Image: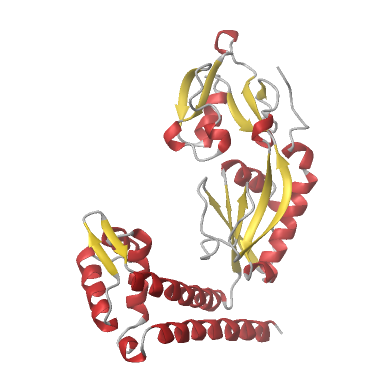
Amino acid sequence: MKSIGHLLFAILHLRRVQSGLETALNAFHVSEMKNVDWDDLRLFLAVARHGGLTGAAREQASSAATVGRRMLALERAIGRPLFMRRQTGYELTDDGRNLLARAQAMELGARTIADWLEAEGQRSVVRISAGTWTANFLAANFARLWRPDDPFRIAFKTTEARLDIAHREVEIGVRNAQPDSPNLAARRTVEVAHAPFRARSLVPARRDEWVAISPEDATTRSARWLSGRSDVVMAAWANTPRTLHDLIRAGVGKGVLPCFAGDRDADLERAGAEIAELREWQWLVMHNDDRHRPDVRTVIDRMVALVTAHAALFGGERPVGEG
């Protein structure tokens, strides 16, 4: 039955790839597309993503000169200009944007087939994108997410940036907002509270000093909370949440952490009340298609069960100590 399921899954996505090809051929006359192959379209997608040749060449392990020649050849094969070449980079023309939408649909279907073929005969991989503290919590409770007899493995992508779920950079993303893309689905889980924390050993003379993520590296509301405030004395800056945590633990100053991170550290204590304006809901975001995969659905259900069981911790209702 497993082989039949894999076969049906492959047939479904092969039909999607075929549909994408037919759409592209309808948009660009068949005679214009006859000399275009998928490798050229992959390079085109890379140039469009990076807005120029250098980034595309790095992604495709090629040279900028080679990519540039291939793009000229692609334009000649199609008979239409795809880029406006400027000193600041490559900007898509109307025809370029038209082709981009269709090539992305083809890439999506082809990547899904490639993933299936690669995984045949071995365990699939469910990739989870999460910020530093959520990834830390999930790793500490890994036994609740994965069992040795599961037919899949889990890969963490720890980053404060938002990876592209719509284009399958990951299967599951932990977010602080509901997605607005029609291709994405989401499940709301728990509320997350934030508060200032300090080391229990922090000397009184330093109790009014702060540490924070530097403004140029702040990507979340909690990281930006101290930015621009004139009523705080800064002792040090960090560029990552992990280093911020290390500075707080070392007694350099107090800093803002999610309560489920700070309250789990016995060496830290609350340095004040919850920062109410930073309270937010946590969402699990996934592609509309991927959420029906048995492995992805299993991981989602386990993640929801895990964080829901710790809702009080996430909501700041289990402080180790307050000051």
**What is the count of numbered marks?**
0
Residue placed most toward the observer, 140 or 254? 254
Q: Residue at x 64, y 85 (%)?
A: 8
Task: Mark yes or no: residue 321 visible.
Answer: yes
Which residue is rendered at x = 58% and y = 11% of the image? 203
Residue appearing at x 46%, y 77% in the figure: 106
Residue 2 in picture, x, y percent from top left: 68, 81
Q: Is residue 126 above or below residue 263?
A: below
Q: Using the image, determine if residue 167 lies above or below residue 99.
A: above
Single out the residue that lies furthest toward the front.
94
**Residue 94: x, y in percent?**
35, 70
Foreground pick, 272 / 281: 281
Left or right? Give the position of 9 relative to 229: right
Residue 300 image-quadrant placement: bottom right
Q: Is residue 262 visible?
A: no
Measured as percent of width and height from the top left, residue 132 is found at 56, 42
Q: Quadrant of the N terminus?
A: bottom right
- Model colouring: secondary structure
Which quadrant of the figure contains the C terminus? top right
Q: Residue 36 falls in which quadrant of the image?
A: bottom left
Return the x and y of residue 151 as percentages of the image width and height: 67, 69
- Determine the residue positioned at 70% across, 70% down: 294
Residue at the top extreme of this rendering: 205
Between 289 and 309, which is closer to the camera in this rendering?
289
| Image position of 39 (left or right of 172) | left
Extreme bottom residue here?
A: 31
Q: Is residue 305 above or below residue 277?
A: below
Q: Where on the picture, by quarter, is residue 301?
A: bottom right
